[in-house]
Image (tube, grey):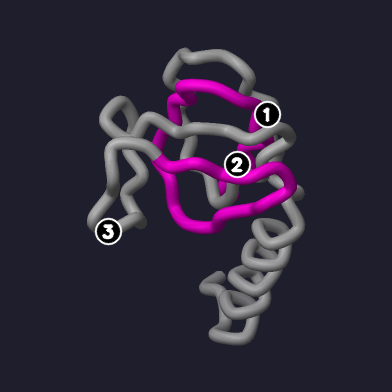
Amino acid sequence: MANTKEEILLKDLKKLDMNSLGQCGSIIIDDTVEHTGPFIAFTALAEAVIDTSECDLGSLEDQPDTITIPLGVTIFGLFESVELDSGTIIAYRRC
């Protein structure tokens, strides 16, 4: 039986809600190894420097060589992988 438009919409809304609340899993990253996602957000637990030359931050345009995320700040996007130069982040997985 085919899904109705309403069922498809409700499923998509549930996935969006789960993504926005970080319910699809997360990892704490505090090393300088590349980690693969996809991820939808990063929150800095300590000021963190992302090495953009070593990862795929697909949704960021005109990327500098590094991005510094201050303590407590969250950035959102669709990130395929991430590699830190320093600091600690929580990387939230995409559903």
Q: Which of disc 1 and disc 2 is earlier in sequence?
A: 1
Quadrant of the rendered image containing residue 26: top right
Q: Which residue is mark 2?
A: 93
Secondary element at image label 2: strand
Q: Main secondary structure of the magenta part?
A: strand
Quadrant of the rendered image containing residue 11: bottom right
Q: Nearer the viewer, residue 74 or 66?
A: 66
Q: Which one is in front in this view, the residue at disc 3 or the one at disc 2?
A: 3
The answer to whether mark 3 and mark 2 are in CB contact below 8 A is no
The answer to whether mark 2 and mark 1 are in CB contact below 8 A is yes
Q: Residue at x 54, y 57 (%)?
A: 76
Q: Which residue is mark 1?
A: 27
Label ID, residue 61: 3
**On the rendered structure, is 62 left or right of 40?**
left
Q: x, y (%) of residue 34?
A: 43, 20
Q: Nearer the viewer, residue 38 or 70?
A: 70
Q: Which of disc 3 and disc 1 is earlier in sequence?
A: 1
Q: Residue at x 43, y 45 (%)?
A: 79
**Kind of residue at disc 1:** Ile
Q: Residue at x 48, y 25 (%)?
A: 84
Gap in angstroms between the C-alphas marked 3 and 2: 21 Å
Eyeballing the image, is 52 above or below 3? above
Q: x, y (%) of residue 73?
A: 67, 52
Gap in angstroms between the C-alphas marked 1 and 3: 25 Å
**On the rendered structure, is 29 left or right of 80?**
right
Magenta residues (range): 67-95
Label ID, residue 64: none
Report if residue 93 lies within the magenta region: yes
**Kind of residue at disc 2:** Arg
- Packing grade of label 3 (10 A; few <14, some 14-19, many >=20) is few
